[in-house]
Image (cartoon, rainbow, N blue to C red):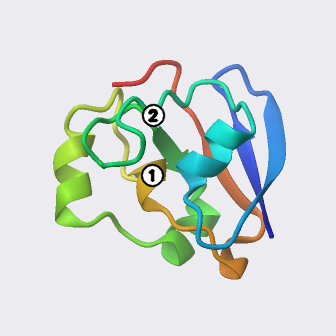
């Protein structure tokens, strides 16, 4: 189980365990992480699970696929390290992952 730290827009950190094969979004929802709305339930059809991947983790997480890039156009304050958490699969390699949530979604 990979440990994932979510830092909200006020700076509060919550570290939770993510099951291998789940997504970072599913992990957030299961653990009541604030500022992750996930309105589409992980279908990559909205931008309400937007996160900023910590720069130290960008290479391991990888770049967004074209469909995700299109949906990021609807996200709030997109940055180069923006991702939709529904598109990041939890793996043992992501143990220690740090993501930040924007003050608002979509």
Side of 102 where 92 appears, left or right: right
Q: Which residue is depicted at the point 72% across and 79% down?
A: 92
Q: Which comes sooner in the sequence, label 1 or label 2?
A: 2
x and y percentages locating residue 97 in the rendered image: 70, 61
Quarter of the N terminus within the rendering: bottom right
| Residue at x-position 58% and y-position 49% | 26
Q: How crowded is mark 1: few (under 14 residues within 10 Å), some or many (20 or more)?
A: many
Q: Name the residue under label 2.
A: 38
The correct choice, above or below, for 64 with respect to 70 in the image is below
Q: Marks 1 and 2: CB-CB under 8 Å?
A: yes
Residue at (26%, 54%) from the top-left corner?
68
The reply, left or right, for residue 29 in relation to residue 66 is right
Rendered position, 4 above or below 20: above
Q: Which mark is residue 86?
A: 1
- Side (left or right) of 94 relative to 17: left
Query: What percent of the width, then of the height, locates residue 54?
Result: 60, 55
Relative depth, front residue between 25 and 9: 25
**Alpha-carbon neighbours of circle 2 within 10 Å: few (<14), some, or many (≥20)?**
many
- Where in the figure is residue 57, as x and y percent of width and height? 60, 67
Image position, residue 27 (x, y; %): 66, 50
């Amino acid at each position: 189980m990979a440990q994932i730290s979510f830092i909200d827009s006020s700076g509060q950190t919550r570290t939770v365990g993510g099951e291998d094969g789940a997504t970072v979004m599913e992990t957030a929802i299961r653990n009541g992480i604030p500022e992750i709305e996930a309105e589409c339930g992980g279908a990559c059809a909205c931008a309400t699970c937007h996160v900023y991947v910590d720069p130290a983790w960008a290479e391991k997480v990888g770049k967004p696929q074209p469909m995700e890039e299109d949906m990021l156009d609807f996200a709030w304050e997109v940055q180069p390290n923006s991702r939709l958490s529904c598109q990041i699969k939890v793996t043992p390699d992501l143990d220690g992952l740090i993501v930040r949530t924007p003050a608002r979604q979509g």
